[in-house]
Image (cartoon, helix red, strand yellow):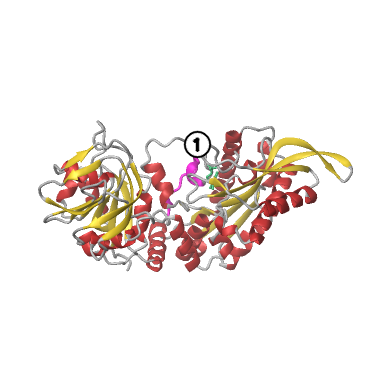
Amino acid sequence: MKNMKYDTILVLDFGGQYCHLIGRRVRENNVYSEIVPYDIEPDEIKVLGEKLNIKGIILSGGPASVFDDHAPKPDMRIFDLGLPVLGLCYGHQLIAKIFGGEVKRAECREYGPAYAIIEKPVGVLEGLNRKERVWMSHSDTVFSVPSDFEILAFTKNCPVAAFKHKTKPIYGLQWHPEVAHTINGTKMIHNFIFKVCGCSANWKMENVIERMVNEVKSEVGDGKAIIALSGGIDSSVATLIAAKALGGKLTAVFVDHGFMREKEPEFVKNTFEKFGINLVVVNAQDRFLEKLKGIKDPEAKRKVIGEEFIHVFEEIAERVGAEYLIQGTIYPDRIESGFRRFSDKIKTHHNVAGLPIRMKFKKIVEPLRDLYKDEVRKVAQLLGLPEEIVHRQPFPGPGLAVRVIGEVTREKVDIARKADEIVREEIEKSGLKDRFWQYFAVLTDTKATGVKGDARAYGYVVAVRVVESREAMTASFAKVPFKILERISTRITSEIPQVARVVYDITHKPPATIEWE
Ligand code: XMP
């Protein structure tokens, strides 16, 4: 197992919104996939091939037109590697154009469901019906295939909706098999992976765990390692993997900055002590509050918290003599920083990775670096982490400090914590929890007049935020039933004397972000 190479499909990223979805659809078949830049060169593929058994290439969709001056194009030599290639949408048009087919600039965009008539159900389309409902989202259209290719399917608007090279395993599909609206999309991807590329399904979570543990063992050797454990799913799983590999040579550090949710520090402590992990809990509440005195600007708050966190962490690392740093970086984190060359910074996210660590470690070890979030959840379940961690809603590193607008004081954090607990309790009681990505309270820095009993009350405004999202890149405010919002509002105003009013945040992301700061 240790040295086995996973059969792998490379997904060339032409900037399509569904690129990661393609990668995940492949992995759902227990075949490993890796997203790589669209202009990857054969030499780079060769280097990847030292660790992975590369069996096929998918060209993703993308926003460009093949007619654009700077249309992204693959390195032509990838077609000579003898590997099967599947082009999707923009990838389909590219193959047609590159090999000399006729592609026309469309006057309008075709978006939505379409019916493909499959004339030749072979290769990627093997076993499919004559008429298949597929999902389209494109503007340019292929009108005729290059001479070495044959048409496999067409739709009302696309004379060449699917094609194949006559002798080589090169395919193109104009539609998106990776989205659920293409009814038999899963079968098309399955056909490509297994029938065309001949992969074996050898990428299973049980093997992946064993591989990660072995990797940490060999990277750290006889050294000592440290990890910042926040209680979030990524750092929790990375901690357990590292502990399996290193036992007592691992120190997990939980920094209690005082901005945790109700009962959270105790929960993390109890959970990880049960796993027999060498855990240091640092109560640094006073330190953080002191540093935040007088600071109102959200980015300044994040920066101060991040830096103080690093100070505390470095102190412990030095004390235990750790030479290696373990981190819970996951696949999307890595891709975002490596391949999204033009993405704008929206806010500084707080994790050890994003912050300058002055201490010199021999190496940073990232056992989860190849996993998507849902895969990390599977690993968490297999490792026996409690449900509260496996399905935990995301929580920002700076914690409640970024849910208290303006200057952070102990009193305000306490109010935010109580309001947050009420929101959590009511949403969880409602049975709707699984529909929501996040649900929390924000203590605004506005006060409003109210009347409590017979007296005038002047107190804080608390905002309740509940959002639905898939990956947090975009989010919609949730249409939570008024009955539940009413219970939340009644409880917050009656159980927290300093609060006079509760409002509900009805802003999507974009234009808002999920958190308020
Ligand atoms: P925004 O507010 O940018 O948040 O829409 C997107 C997602 O990221 C979470 N978030 C953070 N996570 N450290 C984290 O680990 C942070 O500093 C941080 N700030 C925001 C947020 O809760 C949402 O799920």
Q: Is residue 38 left or right of residue 513?
A: left
Residue 352 drawn above or below residue 235: above
Residue found at x 50% / y 47%: 472
Residue 13 location, x and y as percent? Answer: 31, 45
Residue found at x 32% / y 54%: 134
Residue found at x 15% / y 55%: 82
Q: Residue furthest right?
A: 454
Q: Nearer the viewer, residue 345 or 243?
A: 345
Residue 69 location, x and y as percent? Answer: 24, 31
Mark 1 Cα shell of 10 Å, populated few (<14), some (14-19), many (≥20): few
Residue type for callout 1: Ile
Per the rendered image, the range of residues in magenta is 352-366
Magenta span main SS: loop
Ligand 1 placement by image quarter: top right
Q: Is residue 254 left or right of residue 96?
A: right
Q: Nearer the viewer, residue 222 or 394?
A: 394
Residue 280 lies in quadrant? bottom right
**Can residue 149 be seen in this snapshot?**
yes
Residue 263 lies in quadrant? bottom right
Disc 1 CB within 8 Å of nearest ligand 1 atom: yes
| Residue located beneath label 1 in the image | 346
Residue 93 location, x and y as percent? Answer: 23, 44
Quadrant containing the C terminus in the rendered view? top right
